[in-house]
Amino acid sequence: MKAFVTGVAGQLGHDIMKELARRHHEAIGSDLSPGSSCVPLDITDKGAVCAAISKVQPDVIFHCAAWTDVDGAEDPANKADVRKINADGTRNLAEAAKATSAKIVYVSTDYVFDGQGETPWRPDDQCFEPLNHYGQTKLEGEFAVTELTDRFFIVRTSWVFGSNGKNFVRTMLNVAKSHTTVRVVNDQIGSPTYTLDLARLLVDMAETDRYGFYHAANEGDYISWCDFTKEIYRQAHIEAEVLPVTTEEYGLNKAVRPFNSRLDKTKLSEARFAPLPDWQDALARYLKGVEL
């Protein structure tokens, strides 16, 4: 299998490249700036995208590049760029996939839902009124993919952490270096997702033709950010006190956050894909590679 991967400088794209190499698949990685293992590509440049995909002729495109700064996306000065990257850039890749008969794996988010209620979101649930600009543009990316091709895997995930970049786990570890007490939101509920595990699943998918919408996160109980922080500190042997606060009490985010990020992942097993391991296990494996 020959793969083209966008966003390889990020957490997930980095791990997908590693997983493809482990399975001896040919992989070409891209990002906005060139690196030792990728080619430069601005996904908002339609001509450049078409030329790159036409030259590579991949069997599958893993589309991981995105604007992921949720609060920054709310800045009026950034909104047009966010849409160009998350919506228009995705459309460019979907058009290139269609033109070359390539499969496309589009990594989306629980933010496409309205974040209300307590029932886990199912892959076939209708997406109405995302809470913020990031979620809206990722949803527009989903629309572009489904409009242009039926050879797609749209995989929504949540609370992503990995070794190659910024994430909540790393932030909490750094906070504990200078604070003995940490305030963390306890009324937003969801599941963490380790990019190493998600990368394995996405490559599993790309090796099949079991197309469609899926939800993927590590298994285990749904938790709050506060619960997650307590487990991070327990496993890392950090004695900082974690104080639960409501989203309203925390009050530091520009973008509205979902209270309900629960994702129903049962379709994975129904489609004969192996679920991701338990999130506590994923966290333990991640922490082994982190300098505490």
Image (cartoon, grey):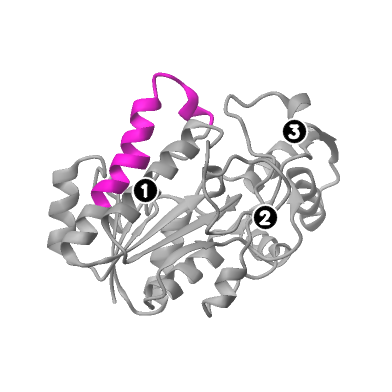
x and y percentages locating residue 287 in the rendered image: 67, 59
The three-letter code of the residue at mark 2 reads: Pro
The answer to which image quadrant residue 256 occupies is: top right
Residue labelled with disc 2: 120
Q: Quadrant of the N terminus?
A: bottom left
Q: Amino acid at mark 1?
A: Phe
How far apart are the alpha carbons under marks 2 and 1?
A: 22 Å
Residue linked to disc 3:
178
> Viewer-nearest of labels 1 and 3?
1
Magenta region includes residue 259: no
Give SS at disc 1: helix
Q: Earlier in the sequence, mark 1 or mark 3?
A: 1
Depth check: 40 or 216 in front? 216
Q: Nearer the viewer, residue 180 or 205?
A: 205
Q: Where residue 143 is drawn, which disc sits there?
A: 1
Most foreground residue, 186 or 34: 186
Q: First in sequence: mark 3 or mark 2?
A: 2
Q: CA distance from mark 3 to mark 2?
A: 36 Å
